[in-house]
Image (cartoon, helix red, strand yellow):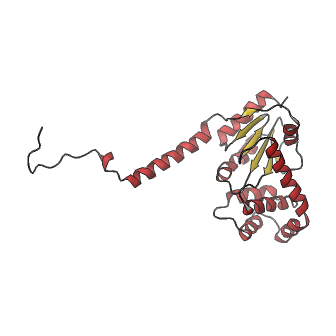
């Protein structure tokens, strides 16, 4: 049908008039929400490991910072980096797991793979461990926003409860021990074939990538049903 001269042009559907930039932003937000939902609701991926010497050593480690049950039925080992965005986003799920599950133990393996500030942050947390302040400092560094610098790392640790003078002394006096601990974590990561952070060893299951509350609880339940590696 021909349109008469001077007649108004028919209205186009609204979606055609959305500016590309706004549409791109909306799609990005939707993708972000979908990713978060995936972390929260998807069943945990991963593969079941046999009880090799490397797996037994990682799960039985009593030298790394840990919290939870003294005699757990499931041990969760997490390899992490303080400049890893996914580590930061999913770290609170570990704290909430410990609050609701009295039979789980969590072991933290600082594995700084994102440059000098990751390394310094890990050393600072392990130095704070010498004064019984690993967990508060760990949580504070994970929650810290913005760029990490030496001054920022120290300030975050002190604000979390670490003594500044002792922290500096322990970084200096225990430098070799901290070197050996970080080297041990790196060797364990390589022995398990890890590709990045965060990575979890939940009982016998190796899971690479972040786990939200539901996915982490599901992984623990699965490990509980399976029992220890054998």
Q: Is residue 88 above or below residue 160?
A: above
Query: At x 49% / y 49%, what residue is drawn?
Result: 29
Res. 151 image quadrant: bottom right
Q: Is residue 38 above or below residue 224?
A: below
Query: At which x and y percent is residue 69?
Result: 84, 42
Query: At which x and y percent is residue 220?
Result: 74, 35
Q: Is residue 163 above or below residue 4?
A: below
* 107 sits left or right of 89 in the view: right
Query: At x 83% / y 61%, what residue is drawn?
Result: 128
Q: Is residue 149 above or below residue 112?
A: below
* 61 sits left or right of 49 in the view: right
Q: Is residue 106 visible?
A: no
The N terminus: image quadrant: top left
* 95 sits left or right of 183 in the view: left
Observer-nearest of 194 and 219: 194
Query: At which x and y percent is residue 154?
Result: 76, 68
> Which residue reaches farthest left?
5
* 216 sits left or right of 132 in the view: left
Query: At x 34% / y 51%, what residue is drawn?
Result: 18
Q: Is residue 143 visible?
A: yes
The C terminus: image quadrant: top right
Query: At which x and y percent is residue 72?
Result: 84, 38
| Callout count | 0
Query: At x 51% / y 45%, what residue is drawn?
Result: 31
Observer-nearest of 112 and 154: 112
Observer-nearest of 102 and 115: 115
Observer-nearest of 76 and 200: 200
């Amino acid at each position: 049908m021909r349109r008469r001269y001077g007649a108004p042009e028919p209205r186009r559907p609204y979606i055609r008039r959305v500016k590309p930039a706004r549409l791109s932003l909306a799609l990005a937000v939707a993708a972000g929400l979908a990713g978060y939902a995936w972390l929260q609701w998807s069943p945990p991926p991963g593969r079941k490991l046999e009880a090799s010497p490397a797996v037994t050593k990682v799960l039985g480690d009593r030298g790394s910072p840990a919290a939870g049950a003294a005699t757990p039925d499931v041990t969760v080992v997490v390899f992490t980096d303080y400049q890893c965005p996914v580590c930061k986003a999913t770290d609170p799920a570990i704290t909430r797991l410990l609050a609701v599950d009295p039979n789980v133990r969590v072991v933290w393996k600082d594995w700084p793979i994102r440059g000098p500030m990751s390394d310094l942050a890990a050393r600072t947390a392990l130095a704070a461990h010498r004064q019984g302040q690993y967990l508060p400092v760990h949580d504070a560094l994970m929650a810290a926003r913005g760029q990490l610098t030496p001054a920022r790392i120290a300030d975050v640790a002190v604000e979390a409860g670490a003594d500044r003078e002792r922290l500096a002394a322990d970084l200096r006096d225990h430098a070799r021990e901290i070197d050996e601990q970080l080297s041990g974590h790196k060797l364990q990561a390589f022995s398990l074939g890890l590709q990045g952070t965060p990575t979890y060893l939940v009982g016998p299951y190796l899971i690479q990538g972040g786990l939200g509350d539901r996915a982490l609880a599901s992984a623990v339940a699965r490990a509980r049903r399976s029992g220890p590696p054998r």
